[in-house]
Amino acid sequence: MIARIPLLLLFTTIVFSSIISVHAGSDTVNITRLHASITYDPLEDNGVFDLNITLSSRSETPVELTLDNPFDPSVNLSLVSVDCEPGGNVVVDYGVSDNDITILFNNTSWVMLYFTIEGFMESSNLGSYAAYIDLTGYNGVANLLLTLQIPYGYQVNVTPSTGVTVSQGNESIIVNLSQALFYTITTWVPVTEATTSPTATMTTITSTATSTTIGTSATAITTTSTEPATASIPATHGVLDSILPLVIGIIIIVMITVILVSYRYRR
């Protein structure tokens, strides 16, 4: 495997007139399949970008393939590694000014590129992010697919909706784009408003002294104190005062009678 080095240093002995510049639809080498995958975390603002290119045949002579960069020039791509068939050679070059990806290879019918990607999603509002993917340069590719995976919990909206499918994986939201169009992707985290409507049972405890209300539908406990109520007592003091001497007299007479009866029986 050949690491990324400048094209001129690698192929100084090659006559560049023999290099075939191919795009999708070339009579010599065609792109039969182009699958790309982006795994991205909007909060971290970074992820990985994989590009898998399958060709119609294995070229034994160096072939130069130029692809449109599907991202805005402000997006930062860093090549991590490349892969191809055993015995094949691959050199990758990509620039910001011309915003394309150039691949020079031979003795392989497929190429895999692995990038890190930063600045792909920009914050548009609080908790909302927007991204742009331009696939219009791949209009001649029959088998085109770009898959975007973001963490589970986001809502996703893609315009236009042509060639778009959105599904939920075990830990991510998966967006598939299969048409050579310019896509705008918006993601956001749903916000659930808390409600405090009194739907729970309310218990009220009352007494003549205090009144306490406990509402179970809220966290606050409200206590209302009132002045102690004065009990209404019937006015019976005058009656007792009038019969008290009579009661005492009866008690004295009973006691004298008991004493006399006891004294009589003793004699």
Image: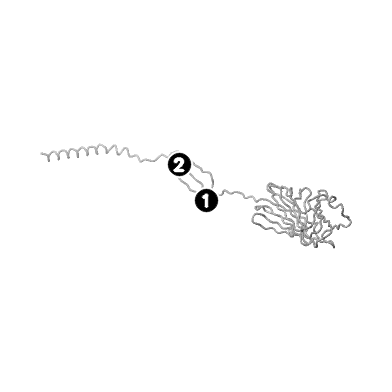
Horizontal arrangement in the rendering, residue 207 relative to residue 46 (left or right) = left
From the viewer's perspective, is 140 left or right of 152? right
* The image quarter in which residue 140 lies: bottom right
Which is nearer the eye, 198 or 94? 94
Left or right: 72 in relation to 128: right
Residue 44, image x, y percentages: 69, 47
Which residue is rendered at x = 24% and y = 37% of the image?
A: 248
The C terminus sits in image quarter:
top left
Return the mark for residue 200: 1
Dot 1 or dot 2, earlier in sequence: 1
Q: Which residue is mark 2?
A: 210
Q: Could you tell me which residue is drawn at 83 percent across and 51 percent down? A: 10
Horizontal and vertical percent position of residue 17: 89, 56
List x then y, in percent, for residue 29.
83, 61
Label 2 sits on what residue type?
Answer: Thr
User: Relative to the observer, which residue lies in front, 211 or 40?
Assistant: 40
Say what secondary structure mark 2 lies in.
strand
* Image location (x, y in percent) of residue 238: 31, 37
